[in-house]
Amino acid sequence: MSNGSSSATAGSGKQLSAAKSVLVVTALGVVFGDIGTSPLYALRECFVGSHGIPLSATNVLGAVSLIFWFLVIIVSIKYVIFVMSADNKGEGGILALMALVHRIGPEKIKNLAIIPFLGIIGAALLFSDGAITPAISVLSAIEGLNVATPMFSPMVIPFAIVVLGVLFILQSHGSGKVGALFGPIMVLWFFTIGVLGAWSVFRCPAVLQALNPLYAVKLLSVSGLKGFTLLGSAFLAVTGAEMLYADIGHFGKSPIRSAWFFIVFPALILNYMGQGAYLLHAGNPENLFYQLSPAWFVYPLVVLATVATIIASQAVISGAFSLARQSVQLGFWPRIRVIHTSKSIIGQVYIPFINIALFIVILLLILGFKKSGNLASAYGIAVSATMLITTALLLLLSRTLWRVPLWITVPVGAFFLLFDLSLFAANLLKVLSGGWVVVIIAAAVCILMTTWVAGRRILQKRVIADAVPLDSFVKSIAAQGDLVRAKRTGVFLVGNPDTVPRALLHNYKHNGVLHAQTLIVTVVTEETPYVPGTERMSFVSLGEGIYKVAFCYGFMESPDIPKALAAAEIPELPHDPQQISYFLGKESLVLSRERSMARWRKPLFLFLARNSLSASSFFNLPPNRVIELGVQIEF
């Protein structure tokens, strides 16, 4: 018996190990594309362009040392160890962290309006980052053709546009089928850049001195303002670290941590060391990444790098889709069309509006900046600001979530805040050399989101002020006695469960009829990613055939009212969906002279409201059983 038990245990252990290995490989294809393709441009930007430092042995060792310690402190320690521990029931990302702080933080934190605002700023910054990453990654990969021969130079921009155009066209088909290939390709990528770097280090082992942090400190201390701007260039090596946290819901913490420490981190360090060794030996920073390659391997390496940057772009695009859906569910963005591209994986979605908007912005960035080096001058502001916000939110949680004593929280928090503030300040120096584009994109998204949030809050106050309390309505119905009843079930959606829906009130006043069963339905978005099926619905019978029903969804879920009703166990509710009618109140907004909002923001909110996806489509209501009753509201 013991031998059989041991064999079963061993077999189970092998299965778990195999499953984890698959997750590790898959995570390589989704999580590490952005940070994994940073060697294409990060160290090069330290020595070229307007912010480049002079090329010398001391500066090379200092720059490589700076990148190495950035990868250790920012990625390995801050994100992989600390930030990834602050998951919101298995989900990560700036909005998930914001919701977590808002949900379990102390009462003083919950009442702070700044928490949702930080989430909005973080989301806006990530949207702007999502536009730059594909542009700079694909451009830098294709520019490798210039190493082989200058004749390809005029073809770099058209080729980059074609590659990204095809990628965005394929988004509507879903990334599931292609995603199966991503992991193995990225394994090949990290193996290749690791080997190329190791060979270069073998030829010039003096570069290993860069492991000593004193070289980075010395470079920063003697370079003055140039040393400060160098922080912004070296910071390009850690862009994409936020993806490690954002994707823990798809793969779990352990596979991502294993992939980082055993594959990605060693490969990146070897490649950056190899690039430093080449600079010490040959001293030519132009197309630095491709200089490590033998001449015969340049074309295959360009192809592999292009595919790797496409994978990195795919990860960023998918992240933008996920972020947009979270924003809608949390009330930060108008309802938009979300298409599920997988029947089995809930996280795989396609959002046409985001897809088109991202491609247009990326196209303009490529045509405007023309070279990856020019784009690098604009890159980093959004990422460094997001990292600063993440640190601030994490510190708010440290006492509540982990019960960390103050004597640890204060010095550690001060270190990371000062560290992130320094990096953000260094990246702000890029504003005049192209960073203004990122600021404008992020500011535009932030204005749209805050306008939507503020407008909805004002609208809700107006609706509540004119609303009839639900309890009073039920009592008046009971007092009337005999009342004509329609032999069907009426479902009325309402934002406030304690007031009578406008559609119900107008139907009753004009027709003098109530349904045999009347359901007052409220959809609640919880500050958790998913809500278990057993906790999806709650209902209260108010008498007279009237029920108050609440359906709860997480911010990673899409509400489906008919499906939820089919699974509901409400007395006397017919199981035949043809016996259920859905009533919606359609508000028509009319601009008023009242200064409830800045004059320039009112038309903006009106535009967002009119272009918002209809409630019937958003809640997946059957079109042939939906009745809309309109009403005008002054705004």
Image (tube, helix red, strand yellow):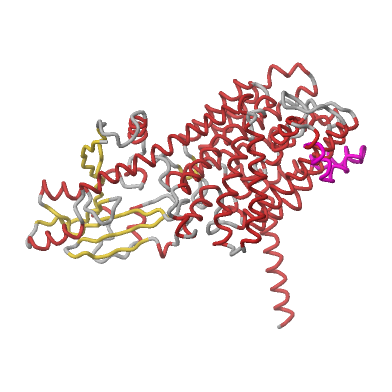
Q: Quadrant of the N terminus?
A: bottom right
Residue 627 is situated, as x and y percent measured from the top left of the image, at 23, 44
Establish if 97 lies above or below 191: below
170 or 85, which lies in front? 85
Q: Quadrant of the C terminus?
A: top left
Q: Quadrant of residue 631?
A: top left
Residue 543 is situated, as x and y percent measured from the top left of the image, at 19, 65
Establish if 166 lies above or below 629: above
Relative horizontal placement of residue 492, taking residue 405 as reference (left or right): left
327 or 563, which lies in front? 327
Relative horizontal placement of residue 181, taking residue 300 as reference (left or right): left
Q: How many marks?
A: 0
- Residue drawn at x 71%, y 55% is 258
Establish if 169 lies above or below 584: above
Q: Which residues are magenta?
A: 192-220
* The stretch drawn in magenta includes residue 621: no
Establish if 115 lies above or below 273: below
Report the residue that reaches farthest toward the bottom.
1
Relative horizontal placement of residue 366, taking residue 373 as reference (left or right): left
Q: Is residue 223 visible?
A: yes
Residue 446 is situated, as x and y percent measured from the top left of the image, at 47, 36
Q: Is residue 181 visible?
A: no
- Residue drawn at x 74%, y 52% is 261
Which SS type dominates the magenta stretch? Answer: helix
Q: Quadrant of residue 12?
A: bottom right
Residue 183 is situated, as x and y percent measured from the top left of the image, at 68, 46
* The stretch drawn in magenta includes residue 217: yes
